[in-house]
Image: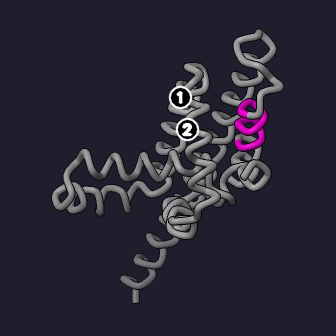
Amino acid sequence: MDLWVLIFAILLLIMVWRNLHLKSIEQKFKYQLYAYRDELRGAAVNGKIDPDFWLFKYFDETISKRIATSHHLTLFHVLALNYRYRGNKEVEEFTKKLDKAVKSNKFYANFQKEMNSATLMYIAEQHYITYKIFKPPVVFIFGAGSFLRNISGSIKKLWSLPGSSASEQYC
């Protein structure tokens, strides 16, 4: 009987720790997003980018949406969105338009790269144990470069997928 009580107590502690851990990293991610949005708006105020350009408005709205929905942003959510909109012509066309606009401006290209990196770290911190368990076999089977490209590509697609961006208004 004492063994079951000990197991229950350990499981309870793990659940409490995980809950606190998730809340902590979510708050940290939200603060990063606020900082990125401030950086974007500051660049517009300082004249580095045009605040009337559609890409500024799109990035600003997407960051605001990501702040509001960050609690839903998990590895499984990212994979589900990528699967749901795979082959969607409107999303693919918008993704090409977005990529072209981002590549034409160094500020937006660097900005998107930083945001993608922060999002990837947030998801990796959320799924720390899953990441540690599944990364070695996936890397062994597909190779390290393929693994990172696929994850980074899925994160980058979040910029143009409905449900994780403001693309519903721009498609």
Give the class, few, some or many, for how many residues have Cα within 10 Å of label 2's Cα (few <14, many ≥20).
Answer: some
| Residue 103 numbered tag | 1
Q: Residue 108: percent from the left, percent from the top?
A: 60, 26
Q: Does the magenta stretch include residue 60?
A: yes
Instruction: Answer with the quarter of the image where residue 89 lies.
Output: bottom right
What predominant SS class does the magenta segment belong to? helix
| Direction from residue 21 to residue 52 in the image, left or right | right
Tell me if label 1 and label 2 are in contact, CB under 8 Å.
yes
| Direction from residue 100 to residue 65 in the image, left or right | right
Q: In which quarter of the image is the N terminus?
A: bottom left
Q: Does the magenta stretch include residue 104?
A: no
For this orientation, the residue located farthest to the bottom is 1
- The span shown in magenta is 55-62
The residue positioned 77% from the left and 27% from the top of the image is 53
Q: What residue type is labelled 2?
A: Asp
Is residue 72 shown above or below 150?
A: below
Residue 15 visible at all: no
For this orientation, the residue located farthest to the top is 46
Is residue 147 shown above or below 80?
A: above
| Direction from residue 98 to residue 4 in the image, left or right | left
Viewer-proximal residue among 100 and 18? 100
Is residue 156 shown above or below 82?
A: above
Q: Residue 119: percent from the left, percent from the top?
A: 54, 43
Q: Residue 80: percent from the left, percent from the top?
A: 53, 68
Could you say whether the residue bearing mark 2 is in a helix, strand or loop? helix
Residue at image mark 2: 99
